[in-house]
Amino acid sequence: MGSALRAARAPLALLLLLTLAGVSVAAFWPHAPDHPYWGQALLAPGVEHGHWLGTDAIGRDLLARVAAGTLVSLAIGALAGVVALLLGLILGALAGYRGGAFDESLMRLVDIASSLPLLLVTVLLLAVLEPSLGLLALLVGSYGALDATRLMRTEARRLRSHEFIVAAQVQGASTARILLRHLGPNLVPAALTAFGTLVPQAILVESFLAFLGLGPSDRAGSLGTLLAEGVQDMAFAPWTLWVPAITLALVLLGFGWLGDRLRTQLAAETGHAG
């Protein structure tokens, strides 16, 4: 675990910097993300008017909006990643450890779910229900849990024939005890690696939904909401698009970099152990 943290220091520093920037702006910046300044619409970035990154079409401060949107996107991505990881870890570990008919049946259900237009289903549900941060995280996390289940199942199948699992079986340990005390902890490195992939995937899906107007709130939308608004004004106010686009790219870069570092470290440790 220590080596994985050392390998992930740089991407974690980037993500921490983005989070701290968002929190600092929310706490100390004099402009609220939902407060319009009438007569100051579409101000270009500058310091003389006090709106360093400019304003949007109704005069809201873009720095405040991007900071709030970054926190919303990070929160939804992290929550959705946790949901996907927990579901994938539980289902994948059960399928990989038990094998047989249970494994086949569960994976067929996963394949059927993967064949459904889940993004369309999510759009329909959000159109009927009131969009909220929790609902978005649950829906997007369930979408990502399919890939997480496959990954955890593969890793569990690899681990179930190891000596420590066989020894626990010989001693008469129950399935629940083996999963919780032996198999589960050894799936954590692979789960952390998957988390670095699931979160940017969740943020991208949420950004697409927000682009369609299905974000969690109008008061402080996510980066996807800001991108949708920026596209409308890009011809005469390109900063309203470029600022949230660059911020979203940095968020995705941080998580993608994190997943890549963790994957490389896990592969190196697995190869060394083998």
Image (spheres, rainbow, N blue to C red):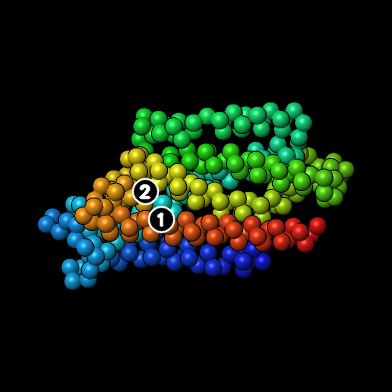
* Depth check, front residue: 197 or 97: 197
Horizontal relation, residue 115 to residue 137: left or right: right
Q: Is residue 91 visible?
A: yes
Horizontal relation, residue 231 to residue 165: left or right: left
Q: Is residue 32 visible?
A: no
Location of residue 17 (image quadrant): bottom left
Tell me, yes or no, whether the two marked residues, 1 and 2, touch with CB atoms within 8 Å. yes
Secondary structure, mark 1, is helix
- The spot of residue 107 in percent (x, y) is 66, 32
Residue positioned most to the bottom: 48
- The spot of residue 156 in percent (x, y) is 73, 44
Location of residue 43 (image quadrant): bottom left
Task: Determine whether 8 is above or below 33 in the image.
Answer: below
Binning the other alpha carbons within 10 Å of mark 1 as few (below 14), some (14 to 19) or many (20 upward) gives: many
Instruction: Name the mark on residue 248.
Output: 1
Location of residue 236 (image quadrant): bottom left
- The spot of residue 9 in percent (x, y) is 56, 68
Q: Residue at x 31, y 46 (%)?
A: 228
Instruction: Compare marks 1 and 2 and give the one earlier in the sequence.
Output: 2
Residue receiving disc 2 = 224
Q: Amino acid at mark 2?
A: Gly
Q: Residue at x 62, y 68 (%)?
A: 6
Q: Residue at x 45, y 49 (%)?
A: 203
Instruction: Name the mark on residue 117.
Output: none
Q: Amino acid at mark 1?
A: Leu
